Image (tube, grey):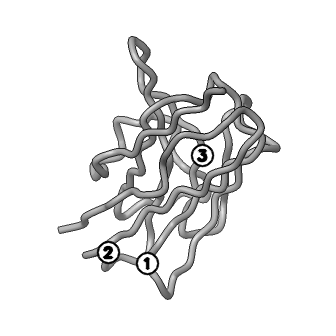
């Protein structure tokens, strides 16, 4: 069974950077989508960034130009590099995956992601 473990969260000042990691195990399929989501207190979970096995990447407008998603297949890890962090980026960040995803782009509906990590807290504050 696919398992995802996030790491790299923490407390940073506005304008700072963090790199989140999502380590995957039990991933045996060739076609997939892996995304980063976040959830702030009293708010719904929202998509942040996503990549597919076919090479597509996507970003929420609020993070475009500041965040970068990437992967290291040899390490079975997906990263989210977060630069120029703002207070509104404060949230619990989750990685999620959907196996057997054949689309070029990631799905827009987070409900289609059926494997989730436990989350890692990112706090941006001075």
- Identity of the residue drawn at 66% across and 60% down: 56
Q: Which residue is mark 3?
A: 49
- Badge 3: few (under 14), some or many (20 or more) residues near its Cα, within 10 Å? many
- Identity of the residue drawn at 42% across and 35% down: 92
Percent across and percent down for residue 120 are 39, 45
* Separation of residues labelled 3 and 2 (CA atoms): 20 Å
Q: Is residue 80 above or below residue 125?
A: below
Q: Which residue is mark 1?
A: 76
Q: Which residue is mark 2?
A: 27
Q: Assess whether mark 1 and mark 2 are in contact (beta carbons under 8 angstroms).
A: yes
Tell me where residue 65 sits by quadrant.
top right
Element assignment for label 2: loop
Percent across and percent down for residue 22 are 43, 62
Percent across and percent down for residue 8 are 48, 56
- Badge 1: few (under 14), some or many (20 or more) residues near its Cα, within 10 Å? few
Mark with earlier residue (3, 1): 3
């Amino acid at each position: 069974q696919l398992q995802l473990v996030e790491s790299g969260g923490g407390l940073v000042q506005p304008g700072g950077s963090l790199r989140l990691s999502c380590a995957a195990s039990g991933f045996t399929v060739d076609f997939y989508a892996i995304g980063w989501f976040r959830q702030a207190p009293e708010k719904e979970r929202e998509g942040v960034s996503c990549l597919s096995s076919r090479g597509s990447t996507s970003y929420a407008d609020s993070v475009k130009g500041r965040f970068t998603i990437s992967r290291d297949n040899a390490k079975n890890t997906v990263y989210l590099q977060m630069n120029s962090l703002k207070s509104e980026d404060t949230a619990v960040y989750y990685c999620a995956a959907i196996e057997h995803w054949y689309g070029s782009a990631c799905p827009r509906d987070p409900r289609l992601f059926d494997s989730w990590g436990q989350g890692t807290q990112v706090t941006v504050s001075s």
